[in-house]
Image (cartoon, grey):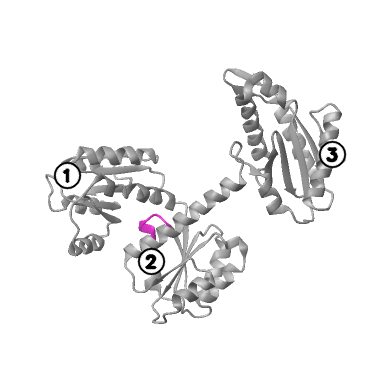
Amino acid sequence: MNRSSNSVLVIDGSRIFRNYLSTHLSALGFKVFVCQDLAETKQTLEVRTDFVFVVSCYHLLDAEDGEVIDLLLENNLKVVVLTAKFEQETRQEFLKKGVLDYILKDSLSSVQYVIPFAKRIKNNQFHHALVVDDSAMMRRTICQLLESQYIRTIQACNGEEALQQLTNNPHISLIISDNYMPEMTGLEMIREIRRHSIHDDISILGLSGSDDKTMTAQYLKAGANDFLHKPFNQEELFCRVNQLLNMQEATKELFKLANQDALTGLWNRRYLFDTIGKNVADRCIAMLDIDFFKKVNDNYGHDGGDAALTHISGMLKAFFGDQIVARFGGEEFCIHYRGEFEKFCKQLERMRRCIEADHVEHQGQVIKYTISIGATSMEGTLGEQIKVADMRLYKAKESGRNQLINS
């Protein structure tokens, strides 16, 4: 795959099907090209072949025996086949040729499957899978299948090597592991992974060719999300993997909805206290808010106020993107900083001056605002630190606003 491409090719003799798929795939952000027969497809492939995937009908007016599928595969394209009838022999033929998937084309509703499939393919490029098996052939087979769906892969031959790979590659989001391996079994590896909350969001699919009927339960109790018996077919593997990644993404989205501020994209107060509420050494806290924010709302409307809040959140991300920044409430924000207090205060002052010199353009109007800041490095609970920082923020307000008070 050309991972920078977002082009998809739809090949079908029915204008209704072409338009339906084109409309829905475009809504997902794909650039859709359409062809109605083999001749048009050949012309298109002479110009470009950088398609993320191709959705093609098996039977076309000028290619009734699937010649278009062979042409697409010869061009190393990922193909989803639409077929009017399903037969086991045809299914085996499709899979043997290496198509991504096949869909029974008996109605528009059945073709709807293409849409979540396309969304899954688009998201897969952000996932990395760790494949763990002592069989090099099995690892290679699974990796080839995953990579055909645009999931990047990393390999390990046993549990110990897998743990090292996980340490070296923190972006891994999926683990597929056999059990019986030298050095450390899959079950032992999973238990070790689940001991650390930092890996809670990793999806784990267990594999085993064992006849032990308790193996599924053993994997699930150890912390795996799903289990698959060997030997398996590629469709079942894809279904399990897709389901795991869909669930993982949905969970992350729910986490964002619960812990991020919708307007600014910053963390909210709940996340701040849940994440860093305990005593932590070398922690600095700053509280800040927009001066005379009510006047901004009165003069420019609530949309203008939202524009100012969005602007300051961008500044906070630019200056403290590697720290925890939360919208505390209304026009008030909190920064959790790990590092030297003096360096923190210098960065706060630079941001304050930058905001003072900048402006927000909103509906043809120029909005200027300033901020006041209170900061502390005292040891204590998060609540105690916030209380001190808030007192210093109040002092900054009382002393004329547009300033930093840190003592």
Q: Which quadrant holds residue 32?
A: top left
Q: Which is nearer the N-term, disc 2 or disc 3? A: 2
Q: Is residue 301 placed above or below 354 in the rendered structure?
A: above
| Label ID, residue 38 | 1
In the rendering, at what x and y percent does residue 238 appear?
A: 36, 61
Q: Is residue 243 placed above or below 51 in the rendered structure?
A: below
Kindly report the distance in space between the C-alpha atoms of the residues bearing marks 3 and 1.
74 Å
Q: Residue at x 84, y 43 (%)?
A: 388
Residue 149 shown in magenta = yes
Say which of 49 and 61 sits in front.
Answer: 61
Residue 160 shown in magenta = no
Say which of 165 and 292 sits in front.
Answer: 292
Identify the amino acid type marked 1: Leu
Identify the amino acid type marked 2: Ile
Q: Which is nearer the N-term, disc 2 or disc 1? A: 1
Q: Mark 2 points at which residue?
A: 142
Q: Mark 3 points at which residue?
A: 391
Is residue 160 at all visible to an observer of this figure? Answer: no
Kindly report the distance in space between the C-alpha atoms of the residues bearing marks 2 and 3.
59 Å
Mark 1 nearby-residue class (10 Å; few <14, some 14–19, many ≥20): many
